[in-house]
Image (cartoon, grey):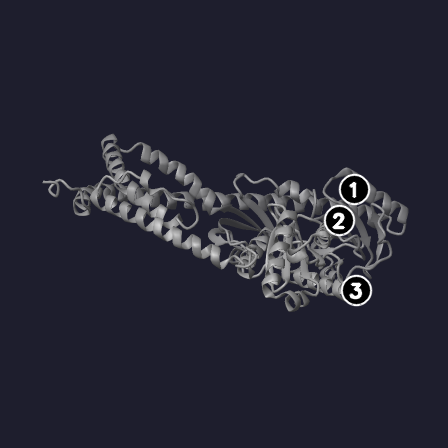
Amino acid sequence: MKRAFRVDLKKLILALATCGVLLTSFNTLFASYQVHKNAFIKDTLHANRVYATKLAQVTELFLQSVNSQLNVSAYHISQRFDDLNAVNQELERLLSQTNSFDSLVVVNPQGQIIAVKPDLDILGMSISPAQLRQVKHQQPIVLDPFRSPADNLMVSPTYPIRTSDGKYLGFVAGGIYLQGETILSRLLGRHHYVDGSYLYVVDGQSRILYHANASRIGEQVFGNAVINEVLKGRVGASEIVNSTGIQMIAGFAPVPMTGWGVVSQRPMASILNELGATHKAVIYSSIPFTVLILALILVVGVQIAKPLTLLAKQLATFNRQQSDATRIFAWYFEAANLKHTLIQSNRSVRRVIKALDTDRKTDKLTSLHNRLSLEYWLENAIRNEVGLSVLAIDIDHFKRINDIHGHSTGDGVLKELAALMVCNARSDDFICRAGGEEFLMFLPKIALNEALCIAERLRKQVFEHTMPQNIKITVSIGVAYWQGNTTTIEEAIELADQALYRAKHTGRNRSCCIDAV
């Protein structure tokens, strides 16, 4: 009779067949998600293309305005080119009249700077041969980005200066900084989205002229398909992965006057977040009866899975924390059987593991930690990068004790010394027997000077303490410090050993230290 009413996995599988309802719901939701995703991406591609085109036009208009301003100044300068005071007055007038320029210079046909405003230490200098080649056609042009003598990255629109009879006298150039709060950053610095979207501008050599991340200005970008397209004079949009590995929706447009390219990008993640919000609305508007069915199946599924899940967690974590499988409500046969087996096996395995773990990590003679336990402790110390001091401790003339009093007495001395070290240690300190009569003590968050004081206190206590059979011993101690990030902890231990050797060679029964590493 009991077997007939027993709940087993076979019956549960038949009951869970109702989950077929979920397949239909999920299929509908998935199809809806894909349709909306494609629509969102298409709309964003269009919006970024339009936005990039708009800013490219704004940049073009700004450069045309700059060109007109330089044209007027070039005319006035040509009338009184030989009068440097008049030339400087014209530069001051233009600089005070507009905020388009950060500096202005006049350059003669040989490339020498003959006037500059504001006053900078570049008067009399010559422009680079590359810049001189750029202006050799004696036409208005925007020089390629360059570093000024003041180490400012800048671009410079230029306009030729000619007399009324057409004689070429040089050119006037306006300097526009690319870094900091500049006219370009004010024109381009605000994006119509505030979700990680950003905009950048590149010149004809793929160098970044403007970027939301100011540290990237001046960087030359290679292998970017969008930049390659916009520098060919094309307007468009596409999905790309940026230089930091983030998937983006990018729109791009060129600035015809300079050959620059404007790229507007929005993270795909922000689109998917917006899509997720829309998709939630679709889910919330689903048929109530379907929601009710899903809720019932969910409740039943949770109740079935709950005991198995809890038992699996107990099985996975029993080696890291104390488990109590007796509190799990196993309401069907397989779960109840598994629960009973797990409880019995956990009890047996924990007893064995605890005994073995304690045995393999403990020095049998002194009950201190051994080398294996030291390895685990050092791994944790290295991972936490907490500075610590190292004490290397060695009993002076220990072989003489064994030779005179016997090894059993020597063992008693080792035990007594271990007890003294434990009494002097904090709860966070770590003491291990390194081998023979050598010990290591690690003092977390203790500086070198303080550790040396602790070592001296321990040394004096050992000197004053009477060991078994009224034996008096002394110890030599080497002290070193590990800062946690400048070198390996093994090197700190080696320095402590070197300090110990120094203590041995300078008379024993003393503490020596090596400077912090």
User: 3 left or right of 445?
Assistant: left
385 is higher (above) or lower (below) than 281: below
What is the number of the mark on residue 352? none
- Percent x, y of residue 216: 63, 52
Q: CA distance from mark 1 to mark 2?
A: 10 Å
- Looking at the picture, which amino acid does disc 2 mark? Gly
Label located before the other in sequence (3 or 1): 1
Residue tagged by mark 2? 174
Residue tagged by mark 1? 94
Few, some or many residues within 10 Å of mark 3 (<14, 14–19, 20+): few
Using the rendered view, name the quadrant where residue 92 is placed.
top right
Determine the secondary structure under disc 1.
helix
Determine the secondary structure under disc 3.
loop
- Looking at the picture, which amino acid does disc 3 mark? Thr
- Percent x, y of residue 158: 73, 52
- Percent x, y of residue 432: 59, 57
Q: Are marks 1 and 2 in contact (CB under 8 Å)?
A: yes
Label located before the other in sequence (2 or 3): 2
